Image (spheres, rainbow, N blue to C red):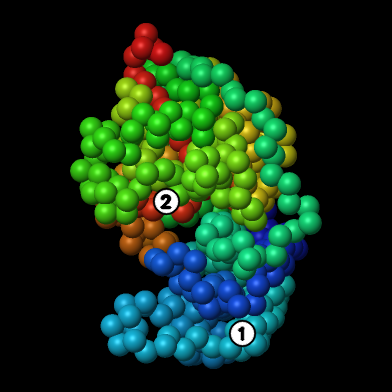
Amino acid sequence: MSIATSVLNRHALLTRYLRNRERSRALFDLLADDAYYSRPIALRHPIVFYEGHLPAFSFNTLIKRALGGPSIDPALEALFARGIDPGDHAASGVSPGWPARSAVREFAAEADRRVVEAIEHADIERPGHPLLDRAEAAFAILEHEAMHQETLLYMWHQLPFAEKRRPSSYAPRLDGALPPHQWLEIPAGRATLGVDRAAIQFGWDNECPAATADVATFTIERHDVTNASFLEFVDAGGYQDPRWWRGEDWTWVQSERMTHPLFWERRDNRWYWRGMFELMPLPLAWPVYVSHAEATAFCRWRGARLPTEAEFQRAAYGAPHDRERSHPWGDDPPAAAHGVFDFSSWDPEPAGSHPAGASAWGVEDLVGNGWTWTSTTFAPFPGFRPMASYPEYSADFFDGEHFVMKGASPATARELLRPTFRNWFRPRYPYVYATFRCVRQDPARG
Ligand SMILES: [Fe+2]
């Protein structure tokens, strides 16, 4: 099987698959048993769905669709492919009737067995095959599970503390000093946005094909906006002033009675941060986690704006003489010194605690410690084609209602830290590990 152009390293794929499954198991083990059918975020499925969905997606994609293998249990494969639409049952009042956990685990074990066998022995790399060219389906299932692990963690974040098992090693980093306010100039230049599929081992359809943008000179904050800075906006009445909010966002602030970021709590006249396993006095030096709507409002209040996707790329990966880097810090593979990612922490860490991860221009924490909101609407690059192994992955979201986030959070797997990787959410979805920083066009105003 080893030909010069092959991307197939069965041992590496198997190691990643087993590592993913082990990490997913550990995430589900964090929960008390009675949380299993609960729905920590109303817009998402209950927890039971995800324990079935991860192996079902892998099985459906690689074994059934790509290799044409037989079913294990057609009903469960369908249920865990899309779940039960909450709308189906809300009206009738009928209980959704999810399977017992033992049945979910039995199905998962068999799906795992067949996926592992395929990775070890099946013909999973076939040039020209719609799902198996460059082993696309195998890589898709690996990245799918890693991405869901972040989704699971931000869902777990919303569960009551009593429904989670706090690891004995849990020790949020509350010690950081406030970083100084500093604006850095990023010189004009060309930024890479997309990449040709054949140029990388694997990429999602929305990253392709190659695309670039010319970026004018701008200034950007060296650090993420911290809880301390955002508190100034809250104290200045930012959530009560429609001048700072886009129309739909202001409607949301009023209808949801938003007065502060979702991760904050007000008790006894003091601010607290709702960590993964405990409530703690608001860590002022941490990046603030907010929705796109709140980030946009803060920027307007400051007389600034969010970066575009192209500006983020230029700030993060650009370098003098237009030689772009693989990561903000250079071409070395991601390591703990470079930032907070790859599940190294349950919560953020103080802004500016990873100077070794600074970009060529000195901008810190662009990858890690929280995704960075951009002002760019999620849209395809010219020449986009939906990928055969997961055609709805991106195309369902090109609706003008989603904004691009770049970078990484503490819960983003290291294999997703490539320059072209794009994430996207609705502007008023407040649950994700996303922060931001401001940019300005005119350096004189900095
Ligand atoms: Fe999924």
Q: Is residue 262 above or below residue 369?
A: below
Q: Is mark 1 within 8 Å of ligand 1?
A: no
Quadrant containing the N terminus in the rendered view: bottom right
Q: Quadrant of residue 115?
A: bottom right
Residue 262 image position (x, y, % from top left): 45, 49
Instruction: Give coordinates of residue 383: x percent, y percent.
Output: 33, 49
Q: Residue at x 64, y 77 (%)?
A: 33
C-alpha distance separating marks 2 and 1: 30 Å
Going from N to C along the chain, the mark reached first, 2 or 1, is: 1
Q: Residue furthest front?
A: 268
Q: Position of residue 94 (x, y in %)?
A: 37, 89
- Tell me the crowding category of disc 1: few under 14, some 14 to 19, or many 20 or more residues within 10 angstroms, Cα based: some
Q: Circle 2: is it few (<14), some (14-19), or many (20+) Cα within 10 Å? A: some
Residue type at numbered disc 2: Pro
| Residue at (32% x, 54% y) in the render | 256
Q: Secondary structure at mark 1?
A: helix
Q: Position of residue 313 (x, y in %)?
A: 46, 32
- The residue shown at (50%, 41%) is 269
Residue 77's disc is: none
Q: Which residue is mark 1?
A: 101
Q: Which residue is mark 2?
A: 430
The residue type indicated by label 1 comes to Arg
Above or below residue 52? Residue 332 is: above
Residue that extends furthest to the right in the rendered view of this protein: 168
Identity of the residue furthest to the top in this view: 444
Observer able to see residue 142 = no
Q: Residue furthest left?
A: 247
Q: Secondary structure at mark 2?
A: loop
What residue sits 46% from the left and 53% below the top? 431
